[in-house]
Amino acid sequence: MTAKITLDILESYLQCKYKCHLKLLGEHGTPSAYEQLMRETRHRLRLAARDALLSQHGERESLCNHAVTVTVLEQSAPLLLDALVEDERLSVRFDALQRAPGPSKLGNFHYIPVLVHEAERPAQPQRTLLELCGVLLGPLQGRMPGYGVLRMARDGQVTKITLHPDDRRLWRWLQEIRDIQGGMPPPLILNRHCQICEFRQRCQEEAVAKDDLSLVRGMGEKEIAKYNRRGSSRLPNCPVHSALASDGRHCHTKCNRIRLR
Ligand code: SF4
């Protein structure tokens, strides 16, 4: 039985589809020192953001730890902290929802998602995570939020991010996550996130055991899929040398293929 889709699962999917699959299966790896540090930093930032948001919106008027339903949203609280969007397959806890002007099925207002992140400045993964949050929130209030808020590590920097709920990729990604949850595992493809991933040892061993194509650095997902379609299980050699350096070095200066193990 697979787990529900959480914020952590969404973020894992954006880092690596296989990681999303492993987490949905309930597997746990050994967090790298970097991952551990990032988790602690995020926890600290969340506490600081919570204080800042409560003092900005008023503690009495704000709601904390509520399941997000139409009834709760219709109360028109200026802030919902730790708001939980849930159904039978999904359980995503938003750091906060902030009331914003603009009509929705709730009235003459709607909510925008707030995400706290340990990154130094807004980059694509955090923007995309916020976009996915917006897409999940939209149907509940009958309106897609046009923007969201990222609260980052750098001095609690607050950045308003424009959201693009019409971007079809967002819906495709959500569907793919649901497919993974439904038992369609993605292929293992080693990638740049592996070096800090909690599953790095497990995946490396699995890749070596099946002599996986992704052991060759420099091969993209599409190229790997092409070789797999051909049914080729052999690691492709360097096109120049008809061989592959096996000691972690390039065959020659322009070769981008390195057998990692
Ligand atoms: S170790 Fe690499 S391939 Fe395995 S789950 Fe992590 S990022 Fe994905």
Image (spheres, grey):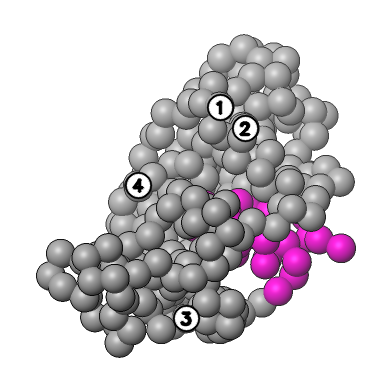
Select label 1 or label 3 by which is in front.
1
Please name the amino acid that badge 1 sits on.
Arg
- 184 relative position to 164: left or right: right
- 61 relative position to 145: left or right: right
Q: Quadrant location of residue 192?
A: bottom left
Residue indicated by mark 2:
171
How far, Cα to Cα, is label 2 from label 3? 31 Å
Say what secondary structure mark 4 lies in. Answer: loop
Upstream in the sequence, badge 4 or badge 2? 4
Select label 4 or label 2 by which is in front.
2
Cβ atoms under marks 1 and 2 closer than 8 Å: yes
* Residue 168 circle label: 1
Residue indicated by mark 4:
122
In the rendered image, residue 161, in percent from the top left (x then y), is placed at 40, 34
Say what secondary structure mark 1 lies in. Answer: helix
Q: Residue furthest left?
A: 253
Say what secondary structure mark 2 lies in. Answer: helix
Q: Is residue 186 magenta?
A: no
